Amino acid sequence: GESVGLHLPTLSVQEGDNSIINCAYSNSASDYFIWYKQESGKGPQFIIDIRSNMDKRQGQRVTVLLNKTVKHLSLQIAATQPGDSAVYFCAETPAGQNFVFGPGTRLSVLP
Amino acid sequence: DGGITQSPKYLFRKEGQNVTLSCEQNLNHDAMYWYRQDPGQGLRLIYYSQIVNDFQKGDIAEGYSVSREKKESFPLTVTSAQKNPTAFYLCASSMQGIGELFFGEGSRLTVL
């Protein structure tokens, strides 16, 4: 597979447990945030997004929380499955500007 | 199915050679982007284009060139001037430069 994220933080969770992946963003003017999932050797896939006028958004088995006070974003995955194993990274953008990407966290799901 | 197609998936280059990575999208998106991904780092923007026949440098444009002659296509040339070209290259697109980025499957370039 690709050597993406060789030195990334790693989160290991037991299958069926909940996962929480964190991201600290840098720009207080950022108003749109996305979580992406990237499997080895593949391109990133959109998971969920949130705008700065919200502090929580839910999707299927995923929830994103936004804390603008401390510039923190988190992704919660419920009932983690083996297929969730991947690198997850956040992206932020102020209106009209290009995205800035975090380095990512590698999620490993243990059987 | 609509999407972004990058080719080739793997490419080997000798030092001193230019190579061109292809990116085609059928999503009818106006904006297209090229990113570079290195281990342990976030994606870094090389070039982007908001409209046909126009493009702008990103954060790490040195040693790269692009063209945008058609809405669907945004090829990236890695020139011999790029000092450390070995990396995973990702092409992306978005509707009118806003909203989520849709990514291709990437091209892995290795310089021998």
Image: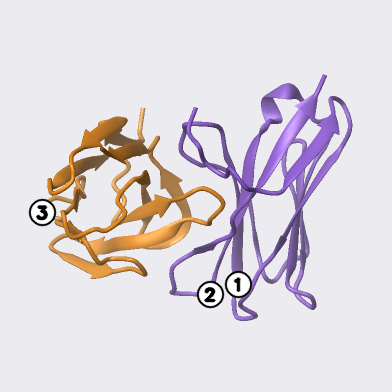
Chain colours: A purple, B orange
Q: Report the label total.
A: 3
Image point (58%, 43%), residue name? A6
Q: Chain of mark 2?
A: A
Q: Which residue is mark 2?
A: A94
Label 3 – label 1 distance at C-alpha: 32 Å
Query: Same chain for marks 3 and 1?
Result: no
Q: Which residue is mark 1?
A: A31
* The C terminus of chain B, quarter of image: top left
For disc 2, the neighbor class at 10 Å (few under 14, some 14 to 19, many from 20) is some
Label 3 is placed on what type of residue? Answer: Glu
Query: Same chain for marks 3 and 2?
Result: no
Label 1 is placed on what type of residue? Answer: Asp
Residue A21 location (% of width, % of height): 76, 49
Residue B95 location (% of width, % of height): 37, 55
CB contact under 8 Å: marks 3 and 2: no
Residue B86 location (% of width, % of height): 33, 45
From what the image shows, is residue B108 above or below residue B71?
above
For disc 3, the neighbor class at 10 Å (few under 14, some 14 to 19, many from 20) is few
Q: Which residue is mark 3?
A: B69
Q: Is residue A69 left or right of residue B66?
A: right
Residue A20 location (% of width, % of height): 81, 47
Image point (43%, 46%), residue name? B102
Label 1 – label 2 distance at C-alpha: 5 Å
Label 2 is placed on what type of residue? Answer: Pro
Label 3 – label 2 distance at C-alpha: 29 Å
Q: Chain of mark 1?
A: A
B77 or B55: nearer the eye? Answer: B77
Q: Chain of mark 3?
A: B
Label 1: which secondary element: loop
Image point (31%, 38%), residue name? B110
Image point (61%, 77%), residue name? A27
